[in-house]
Image (spheres, rainbow, N blue to C red):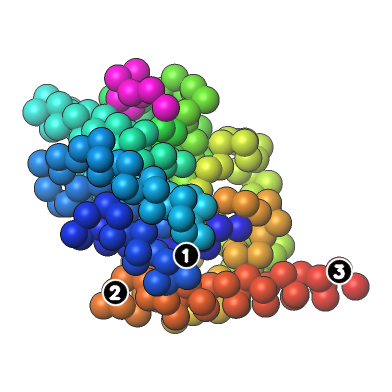
Amino acid sequence: MLIGAHVSNAGGLDRAVERGVARDCDAIQIFSQSPRMWRPTAYTEDDFTEFREAVSNSPIQAVLIHAVYLINCATEDPDMRKKSLASLTQSLRVGSGIGAVGVVLHAGSAKTGDVPKAIKRAGKVIKEALAETEKCPLHLEDTAGAGGTLGRSFEELEALLDAAGGGKRLGICLDSCHLFASGYDVSTPKSLGEVVDEFDRVVGLKRLGSLHVNDSAVALGSNRDRHAIMGEGILGERGCAVILSEPRFEKLPCVLETGRDHGAPALEDVELAKKLRTRGKSNRRRAKR
C-alpha cells in the first residue's frame, strides 16, 4: 500500500513533491487548480517536466489529481455542463502531463431529481472528457449520499461506469469515511471483508484504482460527509488499522485528506497511518492462529 497525503502545490507543481517528501509520503494527491474556482492554472510543458523529474528523484511512487469540487457532470444547466466538461478535461490533460495514476472525481448530484437520469447525464459528460483526452485514468469516488450526490452505493458506481462507456481508463476511488457514512461498515476485518466482497461482485476489484482513508465524525449510515482526523473519529485507530491492513488494498495509492496541519495531513498523520497499517497486519496474523 502506498500511503500518503493530499498536499498543496502552492508555488508550483514541484513544490507538491517537496511537501510530500517532507511528510514521508509514498503517494500524493493534489488539486491541479484552485478547488473552488473554474479558472484553470496555465501549466507549461516545462512545469510538467520539472514535476516528473522531482517525482522520479523522490520516494513518491504514485500521484493523484483531485478534480475541483464545482464540477457537476449530472447538471441540467447547459452553462454548468460546459464548465464541468472543460474543467474535467483540463484535469485529465494535466494528469497526462505529470504522469498521474488517476484523476479522482465526484461525479455530481441529482439534487432532488431522478437519479437514473442524472447518472446518464453524468456518464455522457465523463465519456466526452475521456474522448477528448488520451492517457490519464479517471477514478470515480464514492459519496456519503448527502444532497443527492451520485455514487452513494456500489450499484450507483457501476451504473456510472456503464453510462460513461465502461472503458479501461475508468476506475473507482473508495473513501473510507464516505463508505461508512453511506452505510458500509468498514470498522472490523469481518465487516470490511464483506464490503470488499460486495464491491467485487457489483463493480469488480479490477476497477479499484485508489483509496482515501479518512476517519468519520458521523455515525454509520448517516449520509453526511464529515471527515475526522485519523484516530479521532468514530472509526478510531482500530477501524483505520483495519482498512489500512486489508490485503486486497495492497499496492493501491492510499491518501489521507484530513489531519493535524490546520486540517490538512501532517507528517505525524502519515506516520500514524503507517503504524496503524503495521498494527492492523499484526492483528490479522494473530487472528489466523
SS type, badge 1: loop
Residue positioned 66% across, 37% down in the render: 201
Label drawn at residue 168: none
Query: Looking at the image, is mark 1 or mark 2 earlier in the sequence?
Result: 1
User: How far separated are the C-alphas under marks 3 and 1?
Assistant: 30 Å
Residue closer to the observer: 68 or 30 = 30
Categorize mark 2 by other alpha carbons within 10 Å: few (<14), some (14-19), many (20+).
few
Quarter-of-image position of residue 279: bottom right
Amino acid type, callout 1: Cys
Q: Nearer the viewer, mark 3 or mark 2?
A: 2
Amino acid type, callout 3: Lys
- Residue 199, position as x, y percentages in the image: 60, 43
Q: Which residue is mark 3?
A: 288
Q: Nearer the viewer, mark 3 or mark 1?
A: 1
Categorize mark 1 by other alpha carbons within 10 Å: few (<14), some (14-19), many (20+).
many
User: How far separated are the C-alphas under marks 3 and 2?
Assistant: 37 Å
Amino acid type, callout 2: Gly
Please state the extent of the stretch shown in magenta in the rendering. 126-135
Label drawn at residue 25: 1
Q: Which residue is mark 2?
A: 263
Query: Looking at the image, is mark 3 or mark 2 earlier in the sequence?
Result: 2
SS type, badge 2: loop
Question: On the rendered structure, is 170 left or right of 74?
Answer: right
User: How far separated are the C-alphas under marks 1 and 2?
Assistant: 17 Å
The majority secondary structure of the magenta stretch comes to helix
Question: On the rendered structure, is 249 left or right of 105?
Answer: right
- Residue 71, position as x, y percentages in the image: 22, 40
- Residue 229, position as x, y percentages in the image: 40, 76
Q: Is residue 151 visible?
A: no
